[in-house]
Image (cartoon, rainbow, N blue to C red):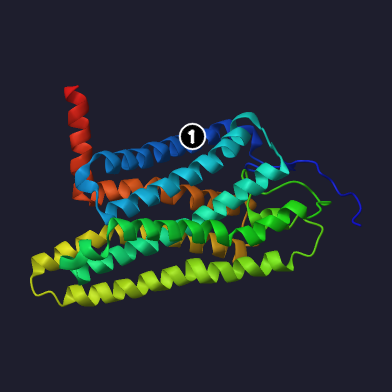
Amino acid sequence: MWPNISTAPFFLTGFPGLEAVHHWISIPFFAVYVSVLLGNGTLLCLIKDDHSLHEPMYYFLAMLAGTDLMVTLTTMPTVMGVLWMNHREISHGACFLQAYIIHSLSIVESGVLLAMAYDRFIAIRTPLRYNSILTNSWVMKAGLGVLMRGFLSLVPPIMPLYWFPYCRSHVLSHAFCLHQDVMKLACADITFNRVYPVILVTLTFFLDALIILFSYILILKMVMGITSGEERAKALNTCISHISCVLVFYITVIGLTFIHRFGKHAPRVVRITMSYVYFLFPPFMNPIIYSIKTKQIQRSILRLFSAHSRA
């Protein structure tokens, strides 16, 4: 039996040493959170209401926006609670649930980006058969598969957190719960919880990134084979938005991994800031990228504004 086992709540942490200016730090955080909610919420509304956007590419974009919204709504209450009111306590159950949702949605986002790469591959390789291959039924099955992969794969490492004894410090290093943060506080054998995530990351993020890279190598080969310069540019342009979102997502993943693995001597505030960048930058950038680079989205936004101005 472990001594000093405690069922006391965990304590979230904002920016250590900067507690006096948390209310100032909260202003850019709140602005980014509102932008994420408005940007992704608008994308979902446009795709739902505009029949010209009822295509596989935009259904996947809706999945991406939905995932980004859920990540934001999962982290926002605790982050803003810490920054605004210094509300640091979080119960074990709420903490484990938050960690489960956050990590599951990260894998879901990677899966959606992979599905979008397949969508672009089919659109360029066999444009005439695009709608017969990527049917609504196929898109729904792909979306369900991506969701199940994300949420089922996180059950094995999260479930043990519920029965681990916690006798060490109950202070977490972020304003939200992460699996790797919580497991270090457990007074138990956490070998499985250390090994499983490494295997999971390899089979999801790493494998997805490789397949996306391979698909774009094939797309580039096909595009280079197009004789018309105008058609070549048009084909490439349809991929720019997706490539940008992939780069934003995987660069932040790689950046966070490097900081945690090799940035032991980096200031703690840098490591914490990088975690926030990982959870906020992709959801913030994705709607902007698609609004700037996709003509159909631009037209849909203009129609929305003109309808409101007439009303």
Tell me: 139 left or right of 296: right
Q: Is residue 31 above or below residue 295?
A: above
Q: Quadrant of residue 7?
A: top right
**Residue in view at x 66 percent, y 70 percent:** 195
Residue pointed to by mark 1:
30
Q: Which residue type does callout 1 highlight?
A: Phe
Determine the image quadrant of residue 235.
Answer: bottom left
Instruction: Estimate the x, y position of residue 101 in percent, counting from the top left.
Output: 56, 49
Q: Is residue 64 above or below residue 157?
A: above
**Residue 15 in view:** yes
Give 228 or 128, whichever is nearer the viewer: 128
Q: Is residue 23 left or right of residue 193?
A: left
Q: Residue furthest top?
A: 311
Q: Report the side of 121 relative to 37 (left or right).
A: left
Can you give x and y, in whole percent of width and height, for residue 122 in the image?
Answer: 25, 68
Q: Position of residue 68 (x, y in %)?
A: 44, 47
* Quadrant for the C terminus in the image: top left
- Residue sitting farthest toward the front: 137
Mark 1 residue crowding within 10 angstroms, few (<14) / some (14–19) / many (20+):
some
> Split into 4 quadrants, where in the image is the N terminus?
bottom right
Visible residue check, residue 12: no
Nearer to the camera, 144 or 125: 144
Where residue 56 appears, as percent x and y from the top left, is 28, 56
> Quarter-wise, where is residue 134 in the image?
bottom left
Please report the residue visible at 37 percent of the width from the left and 69 percent of the height from the top.
212
Q: Which of the pair 274/128 is nearer the observer?
A: 128
